[in-house]
Each structure stands twice: as structure tokens, then as C-alpha cells.
Amino acid sequence: MGQLLLVDSRKLDGFEGLHQAVHGSHVDVMQLGRGRLRGSLSHVGIGDFSLSIGTFSVGMRTQRVSSDDKLIIGMLLAAEERVTHWSFDMRLNDVLVIPPLLEHDGIFHGASAYAAMRFDINEVASLFGGEARLSNPETWRRRDHFRADPDSGAIAAHRLVRIMSHLRTYRSGLTPSTADFWKRSIVECMAANVMSSLPPDDTGWLPSARRLIRRVEEYLDEAGTRPVHVSEICAALGVSRRTLHRAFQEVFGLGPVSFLRHKRLCAVHSILHESVPGSTTVAAVAMQQGFYELGRFSQYYHAMFGERPSQTLGGRTVSRLRVQPSGCEL
């Protein structure tokens, strides 16, 4: 009897779709760039093993809490602008390791594409067989970054996309042997970049900027939903406005004032996106998030998301493909 091959493929119409950026793992997301987010997200599941490939058209901030007990290994497939994960500056086809039960923080400054595989860390001994270092689970228990060789990295990324494309149209159940073959084929693409990796150059001010940003976000979490002024943050943390501005520019490419406004706009978008028309009003939600000049709020909102707040509250029909266990899409 064939093993189930689970396939899910959909178009993205809003940043909320990226909450499932990695199959089986919830990701918190915040839109940083301006414009209506467009993109796609595809998942392939082979038993407990999964491969996800996503694309999106505007800058995003992604965070994942330390509740996932699986190993995630990702590859950057495309990026129009800077991409950072923790304090690692990513280049095309670089590989990122997110160990089990570890918080993750990534920033995409523009349109990007990624691939991520997720599986039990105890499987590395069999999936990476033949490479002593890679088949040792301890190798993958710390966050890491592998700099891809330009030539071999491009080949590995191309193969990974081809494999996903093939499996998305695969119409037969997988036998245990074919399931193992496809898992190994996916893993090999990531492993090729790890084995040929170049030493990363992660010097610079980014790590200390990250630490300051973490302190700011902890302060914002304690403040709850009330609006917080930049001067309050500077006074509470004992930093100058100039230092704070430099840190936010280094990490996000935005000043702290713009970042706080983006954060509140994303909160409004999510509330409106999930609300039933008639259950609330745009004005009420905007006021809750600290927007008191509704005319200016509407301008900010339209510039950020490419639509009016009332359109978000009115609801959008997002077409999703129905999926059969065989992977046949209807």
C-alpha cells in the first residue's frame, strides 16, 4: 500500500498566509514593506517529513516561538534586498539551521523566496548517512548558517524547486522505498550547500543592534496594547534617540517611529481580516491601536497594504486548492 503524499498549494493574498510558512510550525509575521502582498506557498508532506517553498512580494519580519520540537533547515532561494536571520546576513542559496525548541527571528527587507524542510532531528542519522558530521544529531542542535558556494548553491536551489514541482503533480501514492528516495533527494540539496559552504562573514554592528531591538520588544510586550512613544523607550532603556534609530535602521531598514507604526498597522489589518462585517468598525479598531487621526490612518493603511481598511473588513475570497492525499490538485 502506498504511503500518503500530502500536497497543499495556494496563492497568498495578505501577510497572514505566512503564519504557515513552514508546514506544521506556526510563524508570527509582520509586514515591513509597502504594498499588497502577493505570493505563493506550497507544502509537500511525506509522513512526518515536509518541504515548504514560499514566495512573497514585500518585506516581512518572521518570528517563531520555541515550541516546535522539529529540526528546520532552510535555504534562501531569491531576495531582492537584504535578508537576515538572527545576526546572520544571508546570501542567495545560503542554508540556515533552526534547531528544535529554539526561538527564531528573520527579516526580509524585500521580495524573497525560501525553501524549508522540517523533520525529527533523530532522522538525521539515516537521511545524512555517509557524512559523519552531518549524520550526528549534535551537529544540528545549535543555530547555524552555511554560506553557499555560488555555483553549487545555484544548482542545489534549482534541483530543490524542480523536486517540489514534480511532487506537486505526482498522482500516485508513494511506496516506502520511493518515499525514502524523495526525502533523501530533498535533503541532498540542502546538504550539498552545507558541505561546500564558505566561511560566513558576520562581522559588523548587527549582533549588538539585535540585542537592543530585543530589549525594545520586551518593553513593548510589557506595555501591552497601549501606544508607546519613542522618547519613552529611550528613557526606559537609557539609550539615545540616535542609537535607537541606528539600531532599527541596521536591523529593519526602518526608523523606530516607522517600525512602531508598521506594527500597529499590521495589528489593525489582522483584526479587520479576521472580523465579520458588522461586528466592528474600522474606526473602533484604529482607535484601539492608537490611531486617532483617522484620515491619516487611512492614508498610511492604503500605502502599506494597497487597499482601504473597509475592503479588508469586507473580506476577500482567497481561492485555495482542494487537496487529495495523492497530491492531485483540483
Image (cartoon, rainbow, N blue to C red):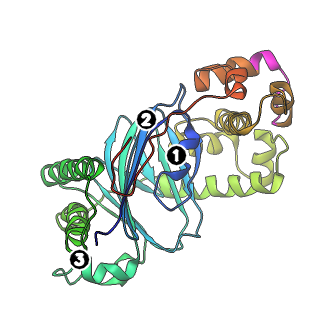
Mark 3 crowd level (few <14, some 14–19, many ≥20, 10 Å Cα): some
Magenta-highlighted residues: 289-296
What x and y, as percent, mark residue 231?
A: 79, 40
Distance from label 3 to label 1 (Cα)? Answer: 29 Å
Prevailing secondary structure of the magenta residues: loop
Give the residue type that dot 3 points to. Answer: Phe
Q: Residue 27, relative to residue 314: is it above or below?
A: below
Quadrant of image for the N terminus: bottom left
Q: Earlier in the sequence, mark 3 or mark 1?
A: 1
Q: Tell me the residue at 49%/39% (across/down).
A: 320
Query: Judging from the image, what secondary structure is the residue with disc 3 in?
Result: loop
Q: Which residue is mark 1?
A: 18
| Secondary-structure class at tag 2 | strand
Residue in front for this viewpoint, 200 or 10: 10
- Any part of residue 135 in sight: no
Q: The residue under label 2 is which amino acid type?
A: Gly
The image shows a total of numbered marks equal to: 3
Identify the residue position indicated by label 2 in the image.
Answer: 39
Residue found 58% across the figure and 30% down from its top: 317
Instruction: Give the camera-side residue of 212 and 5.
Output: 5
Kind of residue at badge 1:
Leu
The reply to whether dot 1 and dot 2 touch (C-beta < 8 Å) is yes
Residue receiving disc 3: 128
Q: How far apart are the alpha carbons under marks 1 and 2?
A: 10 Å
- For image coordinates 68% across by 57% down, the residue present is 215
Where does the C terminus fall, quadrant-wise? top left
| Mark 2 and mark 3 residues within 8 Å of each other at the beta carbon | no
Residue 295 among magenta residues: yes
The location of residue 261, given as percent across then percent down, is: 70, 33
Residue 207 percent coordinates (x, y)? 50, 58
